[in-house]
Image (cartoon, helix red, strand yellow):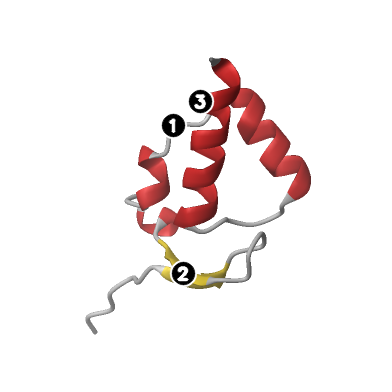
Amino acid sequence: MNQTTKANQITCESCGKPFECGANLGTCWCFSVDLSQETLDNLRESFAKCLCQDCLLSQEKKQKIEVK
């Protein structure tokens, strides 16, 4: 029996947008988003599950502005 693993279809806890999370495959797009440990900790306090690409990229952009 050939069984392939697929990315999880989930809903962003921040904006409610549906998206694919490939973390279970070890190749999710989120691995390339550059977030500081402080930002990650803050997100983990606010959300129990994944956020969509738009929301994570928004957080990445926000942290870069705050660093300047």
Q: Is residue 6 left or right of residue 37?
A: left
Q: Residue at x 32, y 51 (%)?
A: 27
Q: Spatial distance from mark 3 to mark 1, Cα to Cα?
A: 10 Å
Q: Spatial distance from mark 2 to mark 3, Cα to Cα?
A: 25 Å
Observer-nearest of 58 and 3 = 58
Q: Amino acid at mark 2?
A: Phe
Residue 44 at what x, y percent from top left? 70, 42
Mark 1 and mark 2 lie on one chain; the one further toward the N terminus is: 2
Residue 9 at what x, y percent from top left? 48, 74
**Nearest to viewer (mark 3 / mark 1):** 3
Q: Is residue 19 left or right of residue 55?
A: left
Q: Residue at x 63, y 64 (%)?
A: 15
Q: Which residue was labeled with disc 2? A: 19
* Residue 64 image label: 3
Q: Which residue was labeled with disc 1? A: 34
Q: Amino acid at mark 3?
A: Lys
Q: Is residue 1 left or right of residue 64?
A: left
Q: Spatial distance from mark 1 to mark 2, Cα to Cα?
A: 19 Å
The residue furthest top is 68
**Nearest to viewer (mark 2 / mark 3):** 3
Is 1 located above or below residue 26 in the figure?
Answer: below
Is 50 located above or below residue 67 in the figure?
Answer: below
Q: Amino acid at mark 1?
A: Asp
